[in-house]
Image: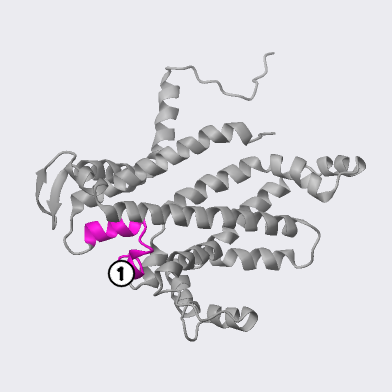
Amino acid sequence: MHKPSGKLRVRYGSRRFWWDTAHAYLFILPAFLILGMFTFYPFVRTFGISFYQWYNIRNPHFIGWENYSTVLHDPMFWASLWHTVYYVLGAVIPTMTIALIIAVLLNSKIRGKSFFRTAYFLPYVTNTIAASMVFLWIYNRDYGLLNYILHALFHVHLIDWLNNPQWAMPAVIMLGIWQFLGFDIVIFLAGLQGIDKMYYDAAEVDGATAWEQFRHITFPLLSPTTFFIFIISIIGAFKVFQQIYVLWNGSTGGPLNSAMTIMVYFMYVGFGGAWHLGEAAAVANILFLIIFVVTVIQMQIGKRWVFYK
């Protein structure tokens, strides 16, 4: 007697096949609706608005690529782009480096690992506005915590972090490192715990030092995790905005615009008074193109050094 295999095979094109397919799409329909309303439609709409001269949400006038030309010929745009690159280079690499070191230490046999993991991750889940408000006090020239520590330990003269153009962007970078360090640590720690211990046991038998184990085992096997963090961190760094907005009370980006990033420039153009919505849409599309190109380059370079076991 023939026994059923336990697996129901549905013939392609049959009524049951289309019924199951309809059910599957019905379940994912809410997700598609949300993505369509809040991701795809705004993206297409922004691209369309960028071709119009649109002030104060009234009387749009089609002008083609003129908004892009206006933005690309604005010295303030290029200054904001440089400040953004400055932030990306100053925040992403140091954050990843410090996070990797701490993750390796937390992955070793030390006491209180759960406490340290929680403590490092707390800044990441802390509201950005609230954290920036606290850093307003930390960066205060006369009674801020940072100047007090620097003066007590190194006898450094009081630094006016928020009013000196030289120190404005470093202040934003330190806030970014503090806030996103915990996320990188947790992801690195997950990657470290996924490495099989047999590699280290074999290396110890061969007499490999701790540095040699890290160089030839840990870092190569951790490359997919490093690659993921690198891409996510750069995308997030390009969109930095809230910290700057709070630290300088909604101004256009610190003293002499020394901390104006692309997102701050976007807000300034679109909602800074004149409501140049067409130019703001052009800025948003240029930022998307920059992030897209940078991500594609990272993906191509990553093929050479990312090792998937």
User: 181 or 168: which is nearer to us?
Assistant: 168
Residue 96 coordinates in the image, percent (x, y): 60, 53
What is the quadrant of the N terminus in the image?
A: top right
Residue 62 coordinates in the image, percent (x, y): 11, 41
Q: Residues within 10 Å of mark 1 (few under 14, many from 20)?
A: some
Q: Residue furthest bottom?
A: 143
User: 28 or 87: which is nearer to us?
Assistant: 87
User: On the image, which quarter does residue 167 sit in?
Assistant: bottom left
Disc count in the image? 1
Say left or right for 67 vs 298. left
Q: Vertically, is 226 above or below 255? A: above
Residue 258 visible: yes
User: On the image, which quarter does residue 58 sit in?
Assistant: bottom left
For image coordinates 20% across by 47% down, the residue present is 70
For image coordinates 19% across by 53% down, the residue present is 277
Say left or right for 109 vs 259. right
Q: Vertically, is 61 above or below 111? A: above
Residue 264 coordinates in the image, percent (x, y): 33, 60
On the image, numbered disc 1 is attached to which residue? 251
Q: Which residues are magenta?
A: 250-271
User: 155 or 28: which is nearer to us?
Assistant: 155
Q: Amino acid at mark 1?
A: Ser
For image coordinates 87% across by 40% down, the residue present is 202
